[in-house]
Image: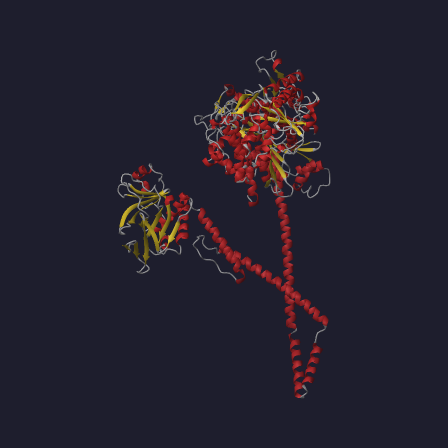
Amino acid sequence: MLSRNKVSRNCSRTRITDASVAPFVDPAADLPDCISLDPLTEDSLLANLLSRFKSDHIYTYIGNILLSINPYKPLAQYTEQAIADYKLRTVAISQLPPHVYALADHAWRSLRDFYSDQVIVITGESGSGKTEASKLILQYLGFATGKSKELETVRQQLLLCNPVLEAFGNAKSLHNDNSSRFGKYIELEFDYKGEPVGGLITHYLLEKSRVTVQHPGERNFHIFFQLLAGADVQLLKSLKLQRNTENYLYLRNNHSNPSVWHQSDKDEFFNTKKALESVGFSAEDIVNIFRIVAAVLKLGNLIFTPVSNIDGTEGCSINNDYELEEVATLLMIPAEELRSALLYRTYSVSCSAMDAHGMAVGGGGGANCFSRDSTLPRDSTTSRTFLGNNHQSHSQPQQLLLQQRTSLLSTSASMVGRDMYQMMDGCHGSDVGFQAALASRAYQDAKDDFVMTDLSAAEATTGRDTLCKALYYRLFTWIINSINERIKVKQHGKRRILGVLDIYGFENLPVNGFEQLIINYCNEKLQHYVTEIVVKEEQEIYMQEGLEWSPILFPDNLAVCDLIEKHNLGLLAIMDEECQRSTNGSDDAFLSRVGQVFQDNIQIEVAWGLLSKNADSTAMNAFRLKHYAGWVTYNVAGFLQKNSDLLVRGLSQSMYQCAHPIVKELFPEGNPRRTTLRRPATSGTQFKMAIIALMRSLRSKNPHFVRCIKPNAFKQPHHFDVQTIQQQIRHLGLLETAQVKKNGFAFRQPYAWFLQRYKMLSTVTWPHWGGVAIEGAARLLRDLPISATEYAFGRRMLFIKNDSTLMQLEDFRRIRLNDLATLIQKTFRGWATRWLFFKRRQAQIKIAAAWRRYKADAPLRRMRWRLSSVILAGCCLLCLPMLFCFRVLVTSFSLLRLSARREYLELRQRRRMIEAVLVIERSYIQWKRRRYLNRLAIRLPSTSPTCREWPNVALFLRDTNQILKKLYHVWRCHRYRIGFDQIGRNRMREKVTASLLFRNRKESYARSVAHPFQGDYVRLRQNSQWRKLVNETSDQYIVFADIVSKITRSSGRLVPVLFVVSTSSMMILDQRTLNIKYRVPAADIVRISLSPFLDDIAVFHVKSSSESSVLSPSFGNKWKGDLVLQTCHVIELVTKMFLVVQNAAGKAPEVNVHTDFEVSVGHQAVEFSFHCTGPTEVQPGHVRIVRRGYRLEVTL
């Protein structure tokens, strides 16, 4: 994996720390799959890993399981080309070099091809590279899938979740510089095409105690250091922060190096902020998040000073009120409200249990008058308690108040139970007196009385730390929920899931506490899951199916899992039982209870039971648990407090009163309207339920495993510690796994499923097999070129030996599916072609019949016409009346009229003729289009963008021709652009800019089109004197350098000077000595003026208040105004200056092309006027400049 540690440049070869490995190291042994080792022993497995590690081959297979050794250095094998190589693979995964990309590709292909849920489980100790492995898997899934625009946003959000989660959930630990301090399970959802459409992130138990306390040599969460190092001054000022980490108590750790890895916290802050924006957080949300982070840091700086009250009890006050004011500003809460919540604790008491003076009535009954959400201090003699009654006047005597306090102090110990209190809204009280505190407090329930107690300095500090941990943990949860809301699937349809599990690794620190127990419990469950899936269930299936199998023994950690999680008798259950005790619930009582329950259990040892076994194995107030990775000693100090994880309701209510939009959402239980008294589940119980749900989810998916190994305990590259790796091989059961994979089978499926998927590979089973499934599978395999040793038949399942055989079957199936698809296409195309042929043939027959009919009816038509003519002529000769002639004519025509039946037949025939004509017409048009496209493909014009040739076409294809012409021009312009290197792209950019600025605006622009922009016309870059000079300035890169004529503003005389434009300024230098006479920063140039004629004059307008334009103290030159220059490269100079100013100032300068404009000369303004009196083509240099008062005339 890529580690975030700096690469040690002194380590040029692999260092082996155990010489015992030398005898069994085979220099030629470098097998990508450990099941190929012969013999397969622990020594040969270790030797193979060492040989590959020396060659930077950090990945090794054990069957379909991937081993990954953390190299603690960057490797050049995570490029886009590597992703493409594995994405476009055509061979089995086992035939490619082992890689995490290969495993990710195999999981993705299994999801797409088999349409089944997949999960990638990454396991290993802390510091073995699990986080980097998960990032690489997500990277591959993001780049290997399609690139449609609709899914690009989803893909980017899924990829950019990691920087956010790492910033808020990762920290430097003893074993890892980027250790995940929370469990992370990402579920990516894919559609039927294998494209990602959304996701879901589930997190498990953030180590929030790190917010307030870190072990020596460790750091707090990354986001604290990133914010202080990367935020700009304005943001830090708004957050009330300073850059020095030593100013904050929660970040002080004298044993850790502030520099964690090669990338600075400042760079990581920009990445985190950019990731937040890309995921979908608004700028306001990001600022609000940072306000909470800053508030946590500022809260940690609060100092509580003990104070003795007048009644002898102990209270406290805040020593640095300015920190409290700033925290209140950040959280948008009144400072007195926050002060009251931190210094006092308020409880409600029912009025029915009080006498006339507000005292509790009855010793035992009074205890039931308290609600069940908070706890009073157990040592009631060290805190001051106030009793108030909302029905009493606020002006009652101070003596009565003091009597009430004393009476309540004497009875509070018997009245107060662990879960029997409810804190009301935070109090504004102070040490001035109870009467002022009572007057400043408003309570929602007017029927209730209240009890307010002072907190000691230690109790206030504990409450502050609890609040900080709750703030950070709930903010982290809110961020993940917000990300889930943005990346959730937004479309309907069937989807499949590919999960990636990256959870904290096994830990054994010098001092282990509650967090380490939870982390190691999670690793125990994962180890049990992996062992059960890979070794136990595999062997059970072989024996159930009747295969010949010699059982392989393996370590089983089920007993340890039961010891921790067993109902009523496990460590977590005992811890919950102690947390629920109203009295006598302490860490010592918990340890005593553990010793009683597990006194005969060999998996656990308590402190007093170690003297006879191993007196030095652990310290007092601790127990020792035998995990799968060895014995771990846990100090029980703080176990119950971390497990109960209670935040007093007064603090919750004060946070709910904050105007900060996010904080109000983080503490919903602070709503005074909430009346629920249900006790929340403890941290251990919540985590156990989450792990049980996780195991259930993992078992419902097809698993893929990445077993991560750390080569040494010092995070050093090129260092192979044999003992460290040997222990991990034994703990992870890798040798047993390799033996099962070597002697077992890589793939198994029921016969019916196998036959349904591969039945098209045999003509006997395709398309349907009517017999028994096992016979069909046997017949199918006999027809394939697969050796009989590559598969075996069980009672219900078919077993395949190697992944290469399965890949071969998939290749056969893919080829056969292509053949079947081709057959379907061929059949359809043949049918479509025949149908079109018959339709055209029928149309041709109809048209031919109509033509023959027309030709055959010609004599009849002529005879009819003659008869009509004869009748008309006879009528005229007989001089019959016109009416009679007309009637005779109509009668003659009626006799010749067709019957109605014949007319109907003619209409139908005419309609058929029209349809036939349309068929022939469409066929003709299609033929013309095909001929046009075929001829166009042969007669395409040149690929030069300047070529204007294009073939002519028929009228009805003119629109299509214009569209194709535009597309072809865009394509050849793109081809032309990608052929440029960086220098060519810059020159093209300059030419395009010049066209935008001067085309149709300045007459001399046409001359510059064919002239390439060279920039340095005097070869100044090669001048050694210039190279020495630029070391004093920031003008190393030259954009333009040439001898130009500077026009004096007093007389208009031309003075040759060396003019240089760099990426940051423009300068005028002496031609011989290269002394800088004037230097103007590019950002100070506001406008450039030119005339529209053929002259070569340009005016650069400079800010009048520019003080940086003087750079020649020896000459004492003062800038006297705008700069007027004449050069034969005026178009190039102005274009380059335009781009330089745009890059330096962030906005483009104005380019003024006009015949009249003003030029500043010192404190005066001179008007430049251009007149063209000569011919259009004026040779360069034929310019006359005359000064007339405040007017400078330029005649061309």
Q: Quick check: 912 above or below 116?
A: below
Looking at this view, is 1039 or 1064 the one in front?
A: 1064
* Colour basis: secondary structure
Occupied quadrant, residue 383:
top right
Looking at this view, is 1037 or 907 the one in front?
A: 1037
Q: Quick check: 353 above or below 618?
A: below
Looking at this view, is 725 or 466 the one in front?
A: 466
Q: Is residue 1116 left or right of residue 456?
A: left
Quadrant occupied by the C terminus: bottom left
Q: Quick check: 1038 above or below 961?
A: above
Q: Position of residue 402 (x, y in %)?
A: 61, 22
Count of all numbered marks drawn on residues in the image: 0
User: Can see residue 1152?
Assistant: yes
Residue in the picture at 48% in, 59% down? 951
User: Can see residue 65?
Assistant: no
Occupied quadrant, residue 551:
top right
Q: Position of residue 720 (x, y in %)?
A: 50, 24
Occupied quadrant, residue 43:
top right
Looking at this view, is 566 or 300 the one in front?
A: 300
Q: Position of residue 1118 (x, y in %)?
A: 30, 43
Q: Position of residue 807 (x, y in %)?
A: 60, 37
